[in-house]
Image (cartoon, rainbow, N blue to C red):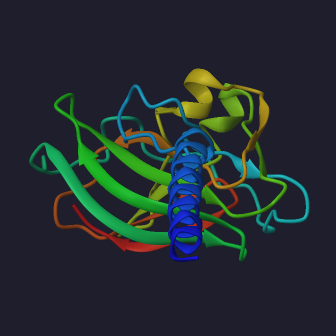
Amino acid sequence: MLRKHLVGLIVGVVLIAVLGAAAVVWLTLNGPQKTGPGPDAAAPAGATASGATQPPSGSPAPSTAAPGTAASASPEAGPRRMSRLLYDDGQNTATVTGLEVTTSGQLRVQLRYETRSPGGWVLSCPERAVDLQSSHLTLADGRRVNPVDTYCAAERSGEDFTLRPGAVLESWGVFPVVPSGGSFSLTWYDLGTVDGLKL
């Protein structure tokens, strides 16, 4: 009788170990996709939500500052990490995760899109000309500065796509550098505005 219980216990332990290993393999293959920020990350720089999750907003006015004229001082090159929520509808979020002054003298804004929606998050990239007028920085003096490039404009111009459930995608936009120490805001497509940003 003791032998019967011992065999049952060993079979139970082996079964739990096999199920645990299968769960680890499944999570590795089907878990959330994560990509690091950077110019080679295969992710949308910015996109507007389509369908019921899209927040209402108007179109921003064109930039009154020419590229390269927004910077009166040259901030030091390098990244500045942050976590500033831009958009949250309860299932989908967009967060500003960093600002980086590039060695070429531009400002690269890093954003992260995440979805917990069972149906994913349907995103849409405008055509390049419209895309580059769809987001902007607002400087302390009220000037608006549009991006000179975005992932949508560079890689997904005119495309609709779905961010799969559980996915995390890094995205970016490139702007002329804003003054060092001056406060500015970022309006990203129709997803919202983050105020009080500084380099």
As drawn, is 147 to the left or to the right of 50?
A: left
Residue 49, percent from left and from top: 77, 54
As drawn, is 58 to the left or to the right of 75?
A: right
Among all residues in the image, which is located at the extreme right? 52
For the C terminus, the image quarter is bottom left
Q: Which residue is drawn at the image coordinates 63% and 43% (left, top)?
A: 30
Nearer to us in this view, 9 or 1: 1
Q: How many marks?
A: 0
87 shown above or below 47: below
186 shown above or below 28: below
Nearer to us in this view, 105 or 4: 4
As drawn, is 177 to the left or to the right of 175?
A: left
Q: Which residue is drawn at the image coordinates 22% and 36% (left, top)?
A: 102
Residue 174, percent from left and from top: 41, 38
Res. 87 image quadrant: bottom right
Q: Which residue is drawn at the image coordinates 52% and 43% (left, top)?
A: 28
Residue 63, percent from left and from top: 53, 46
Q: Is any atom of residue 32 visible in this view? A: no
